[in-house]
Amino acid sequence: MTQIRLVFLSILALLLAACSDSGSPAPAATTPPAQTPVVQEEEAESETDLIARAQAIHDRVITLDTHADINTENFTSSVNYTQDLDTQVNIPKMLEGGLDVAFFIVYTGQGELTEAGYSAAYDNAIDKFEAIHRLAEEIAPDEIELAYTSDDVRRIAGEGKLVAMIGIENAYPIADDISRIEDFHARGGRYMSLAHNGHNQLSDSHTGEAAQDYLHDGLSELGRQALAEMNRLGIMVDISHPSTAAIHEMLELSTAPVIASHSSARALTNHTRNLDDETLLMIRDNGGVVQTVAFGSYISEAQRSFLEQGRARLVNEIAADLDVEVLPPSVVATLSEEAAAEYEAQMDQVNAVLFPRLREEVNALAPAATVADFVDHVDYMVDLIGLDHVGISSDFDGGGGIEGWSDASETFNVTLELVRRGYTEAEIGQLWSGNLLRVLDEVQEIAAAM
């Protein structure tokens, strides 16, 4: 019986093989060898091709720098920005570097909170407003035009012209007259910081941090009114120079997104002008933007610490020679008015000797800050608060300038470093101008609704 069954199974197997579609014998019951896929290796991009790709991106995006200081002596009919002056920003340098938009700054140094101080500050501000208008409307109207809105920026850039905008650094010139803010807005001011290097009638400054010596512990009541007026008019609130407490108060009170027009990350470089992580996260939640600044001691901890230590060494050496005792800021803050005035006079003598030596013996020897250091801060803030909240600024002609981006003619090098790090064209467009213009749009929309 078993033999018959084996014969039957053999015949059945032959019949099944004969009826197969292919007509070929059944494959052996073994596992076929694995097929190795053919992988087309992506050819590495050459340096020449990378630079060409970066240049094409740079040419297509709108590049915008939120902080370029000015000297009104360079805005006359005979000496002006149509010439390649010994300035970090002018029209020839902007064209060479592909910088499309520059916020020219109505900067006023902090003076005394007196009628005379306020009057001089106001005159200084008006002089700078008029100089910027003179450049765009009389000296070079075919080359550069003043923008008041994001749409203006896009239109002017699309027409092949450079774009001027106006930022106000230090609201000290408004004195105690809030109506001046509306006048400054009408003149083209599109952002304003309430303080600079020194406390004023509106806000405390970051300069009080060392001694924890403040005038208002944040904003004054007049400062709060000024903030509300800026929101009403559509002026972006700039938080780059005030104290941390003042910044936090502005973030809590502002009904519109704010900007830091030229600041970087304090976690990387421990300077009082930089923003700590808590503040950066508050700016993200506010919808604002931080314009990373190409200022050497704000983006290179090696440079910052070298300058700080070198200065301290020289101050102590000079003070010893002059028989002056150098006091820590916390002690200076406790001095009587008379003692403080006497100490200030002594330190003026020290500083008169210090500054020339500082340039030669410390500043000239400091480690360089580079475009790579600058983009390290961009990377850090993008990782922490998101790409939508980070931008770019130089502080040219106000102390800014680094190796690789020493003036506007080298602007392309920033884009090149961003491309090297893998940022896409859309992301680079956001960093260069998209995020800042988005904030300006929102600030102006909120003002219109108010």
Image (cartoon, rainbow, N blue to C red):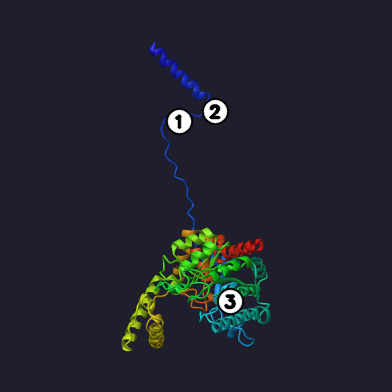
Q: Amino acid at mark 2?
A: Asp
Marks 2 and 3, how far apart at CA? 94 Å
Q: How many marks?
A: 3
Tag 3 secondary structure = helix
Residue 129: numbered disc: none
Label 2 packing within 10 angstroms: few (<14), some (14-19), many (20+): few
The image shows residue 26, relative to residue 81, as above or below, that is above
- Residue 44 shows in the view: no
The image shows residue 242, relative to residue 86, as above or below, that is above
Residue that numbered label 2 is attached to:
21
Q: Nearer the viewer, residue 218 or 78?
A: 218
Q: Position of residue 15 (x, y in %)?
A: 50, 21
Q: Nearer the viewer, residue 197 or 220?
A: 220
Q: Amino acid at mark 1?
A: Pro
Q: Quadrant of the N terminus?
A: top left
Residue that numbered label 1 is attached to:
27
Q: Amino acid at mark 3?
A: Ile
Marks 1 and 3, how far apart at CA? 92 Å
Q: Position of residue 179 (x, y in %)?
A: 63, 73
Q: Position of residue 212 (x, y in %)?
A: 41, 71
329 left or right of 379?
Answer: left
Residue sitting at x 66%, y 63%:
448
Q: Nearer the viewer, residue 123 or 28?
A: 123
Name which of mark 2 and mark 3 comes first in the sequence: 2
Q: Quadrant of the C terminus?
A: bottom right
Residue that numbered label 3 is attached to:
174
Camera-near label (2 vs 3) is 3
Camera-near label (1 vs 3) is 3
